Amino acid sequence: MRDQIRKYTGFLLLLALLAVVPIGIARHMLSESRDDAFVEDKPNYLSHQYPPSGETEMTPRLSRLLEEDMKSVDAVPRTFLARLPETLPDITDAKKRKQQFVSAMLPIILRANELIIADRGRLLAIRERIEREGSAGKRQRRWLEDIARTHRVKLSSPATPDQIERLLFRVDVIPPSLALAQAAMESGWGTSYFAQEGNALFGEWTWNEEEGILPRSRDEGKNHRIKSFEYLLDSVRSYMINLNRHRSYRELRDRRAELREHSLPVSGPALAPSLIDYSERGADYVGDILSIIDYNDLDGLDSASLMNDVQESR
């Protein structure tokens, strides 16, 4: 009888463990993920994957993505890498290295722009409500305050339609060809130490020791670091926010708004001349960005889009 009780008790304990362990794992994943992981118009970092460390670990899906010539793809796969493949610096064929870099980065850039478009839609809805009712809702106001703070736009209480317009002027997409060309320039097509170690693709500076990588060579008297990121998407979003809010890039925003006003495409070649202040090299830097776009036919990717759910399921 005692043996039967022990067996029954052990069986119940096993069932309890089978029930509790998956819940514990799920809770741990949620605690490690971002608060907005499952919000549709926010980054879902749980969907990002780390690339394999070698060819033997390459999955068929990643292999198809990284070997794809994106200029011939109708819809870009929603495969988001957390970081660049560490094999990039070892690829001696320049064409293949560039192809893998573009294949890894384009889905991330398109996703960052997709999130900006979602924010623009939300801003337009809030402006419509303010015009109709005089003020936004409580949740809308909280969100509006956050995005205004991020983009350095002052709001009154209640916010006005003109202030929403100023936000729409800043909350706008960056052409993929421009983002790709600048990432290629600043990171050596993904081979630089900063890109490989900290997803630092655009050479952004920081003075926070906890979020930066110490440059191997730094001018005397300077104490900056190169800003690092946990995810490639964070790096791209930070770069886009920088272009969308910093006073040095007002000309880029003016040019983009002018293109929109005349229903012209917002392209990399059209905006690149506005980046004269991005680098100390000035006009030479702009010339190099335009050369990268032209030589690699990156402007053909400015009309690219991510696969929708129906295309993904095929």
Image: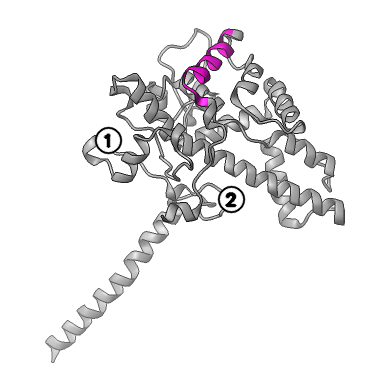
Q: Tag 2's secondary structure?
A: loop
At a point 43% along the width and 49% down the height, the residue shown is: 47
Q: Nearer the viewer, residue 28 or 47?
A: 47
Quarter that holds the C terminus: bottom left
Q: Nearer the viewer, residue 292 or 131?
A: 292
The residue stretch that appears in magenta: 284-298
* Tag 1 residue: 53
At a point 63% along the width and 35% down the height, the residue shown is: 173
Find residue 167 and report its image quarter.
top right
x then y, percent, for residue 102: 43, 30
At a point 45% along the width and 56% down the height, the residue shown is: 30
x then y, percent, for residue 72: 44, 34
Q: Are marks 2 and 1 in contact (CB under 8 Å)?
A: no
* Tag 2 residue: 41
Indicate which disc, 2 or 1, sits on the residue closer to the N terminus.
2
x then y, percent, for residue 12: 26, 80
Distance between mark 2 and mark 1 Cα atoms: 31 Å
Along the horizontal axis of the image, is 173 left or right of 233? right
Q: Is residue 202 visible?
A: no
Q: Amino acid at mark 2?
A: Asp
- Mark 2 Cα shell of 10 Å, populated few (<14), some (14-19), many (≥20): some
Along the horizontal axis of the image, is 145 left or right of 10? right
Q: Amino acid at mark 1?
A: Ser
Q: Tag 1's secondary structure?
A: loop
